[in-house]
Image (tube, rainbow, N blue to C red):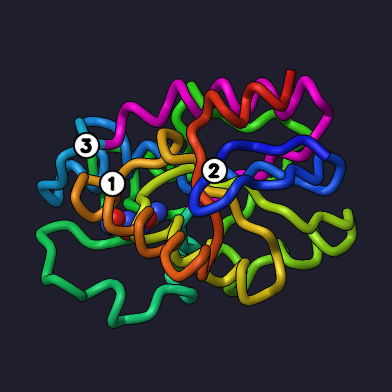
Amino acid sequence: MPIVKAKPFDFELNINHTALICIDMQRDFIMAGGFADTLGNKIANVQSCIPVIAKLQEAFRRNTLPVIHTKECHKPDLSDLPVAKRNRGNPSLRIGDRGNLGRILIDGEAGSDFIHENYPREDELVISKPGKDSFYRTELLDYLYTRNIGSLVFTGVTTEVCVQTTMRNANDRGFDCLLVEDGTDSYFPEFKEMTLRSLTSQGGIVGYTCKSEDLLEMLK
Ligand code: TIU
């Protein structure tokens, strides 16, 4: 089995049972004028993972391995949006309001769609999720079980919110989890750093992290 240089230990890449998961590479989280930007988040800090994710997507596709995309969004009638989530922080613009890129974080609106650099191919699974956890009220677990996938390679934004939440939940469901260090970003670099450290602490309590170049080496 190919071995990827990783922390806290090298990672055995069970290549035919591995999927890439790209978390929430959506305009509202990444682009100028999107929801995150209007809330005052530093979107400049979440740009560097974009070309890394594009390279990983290309490598997984070349090896005919699954690429999964998630997007955090809600139904137009807001029936899956908890009142607490809508109101938290008392923002000037809330989920469901009309922003620069259509209604904020509503499925089907321009802002909730993916950035073009990391856009899903037509045959790839797209998970629309109402929470931070990609397993919560989604078809993800069924998809992974049906395809006998046991390992997940994590990328996306933001490291300490949807990426970490999903990785912890995947770990509890028995998946081997590898987070690509340069394939994930946060508005807060110090949170990213601490998240990488905490996930791999205590002998890989949640999983592994690696550099994209060390993974790409194994995906020729
Ligand atoms: N995708 C994701 O992480 N959703 C967030 O709301 N992240 C923030 O960091 N706000």
Q: Which residue is mark 3?
A: 43
Kindly check if marks 1 and 2 are in contact, taking CB atoms under 8 A apart as contact.
no
Q: Secondary structure at mark 2?
A: loop
Task: Give amino acid for label 3.
Answer: Ile
Residue 53 drawn in magenta? yes
As drawn, 171 above or below 160: below
Count residues near mark 1 (Cα–Cα under 10 Å), then give few for <14, some for 14-19, many for 20+: many
Report the mark closest to the observer, 1 or 3.
Answer: 1
Kindly check if marks 2 and 3 are in contact, taking CB atoms under 8 A apart as contact.
no
As drawn, 100 above or below 48: below
Magenta residue span: 46-71
Q: Quadrant of the N terminus?
A: top right
Q: Secondary structure at mark 3?
A: helix
**Label 2, label 3: how many angstroms apart (C-alpha)?**
28 Å
Q: As rendered, which of 31 and 13 lies closer to the eye?
A: 13
Q: Which residue is mark 1?
A: 186
**Label 1, label 3: how many angstroms apart (C-alpha)?**
9 Å
Residue 13 drawn in magenta? no
